[in-house]
Image (cartoon, grey):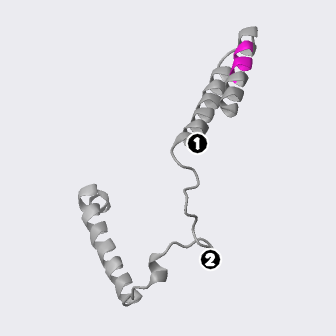
């Protein structure tokens, strides 16, 4: 019996029915709503939202993503290598690449 209830073919419709009942019960408890300007406006701690976007475009995100990609892959390469002069050269090159990426 437990295996039948836990099979996806039976569990999915049971969960759909359960979610529907809980959602309907929540709507009954919530009561009717009234539209107002305060409900449709943005809220940020009681202050008006800024008119311009904080970070226009994706460039700042890609710079940070590339920084972490280089950093994590570089540490992975250093961690899987032995302690040799070539690993030191690689570490210095990794540091220069990260500094160049930060300075833009």
Task: In this rendered view, identify the residue nearer to me: 97 or 72.
Answer: 97
Q: Quadrant of residue 19?
A: bottom left
Task: In this rendered view, identify the residue nearer to me: 26 or 101.
Answer: 101
Task: In the rendered view, tell whether residue 39 sits above or below residue 44.
Answer: below
Q: Main secondary structure of the magenta part?
A: helix
Does the magenta segment cover residue 90? yes
Under tag 2, what secondary structure? loop
Query: On the picture, is 18 further left or further right than 87?
Result: left
Q: Which residue is mark 2?
A: 46
User: Residue 96: horizontal and vertical position, in percent?
Assistant: 72, 22
Task: In the rendered view, tell whether residue 58 sits above or below residue 66.
Answer: below
Magenta segment, which residues?
Answer: 89-94
Q: Which residue is mark 1?
A: 60
Task: In this rendered view, identify the residue nearer to me: 35 or 86.
Answer: 35
Task: In the rendered view, tell whether residue 32 sits above or below residue 72.
Answer: below
Residue at 51 percent of width and 72 percent of height: 42
Residue at 72 percent of width and 28 percent of height: 99
Q: Quadrant of residue 36?
A: bottom left
Residue at 35 percent of width and 78 percent of height: 22
Query: In the current view of this chain or complex, which residue is farthest to the top?
Result: 85
User: Residue 35: horizontal and vertical position, in percent?
Assistant: 39, 85
User: Residue 53: horizontal and vertical position, in percent?
Assistant: 55, 56
- Quarter of the rendering occupied by the C terminus: top right
Task: In the rendered view, tell whether residue 84 sits above or below residue 9.
Answer: above
Contact between labelled residues 2 and 1, with CB atoms less than 8 Å apart: no
Query: On the picture, is 77 further left or further right than 8?
Result: right
Q: Quadrant of residue 82?
A: top right
């Amino acid at each position: 019996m437990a295996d039948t209830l836990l099979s996806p073919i039976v569990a999915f419709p049971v969960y759909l029915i359960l979610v529907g009942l809980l959602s309907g019960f929540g709507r009954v408890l919530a009561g009717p709503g009234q539209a107002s300007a305060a409900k449709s406006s943005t809220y940020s701690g009681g202050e008006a939202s800024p008119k311009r976007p904080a970070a226009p475009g994706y460039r700042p995100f890609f710079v940070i993503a590339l920084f972490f990609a280089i950093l994590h892959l570089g540490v992975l390469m250093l961690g899987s290598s032995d302690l040799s002069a070539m690993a030191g050269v690689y570490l210095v090159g990794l540091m220069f690449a990260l500094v160049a990426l930060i300075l833009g």
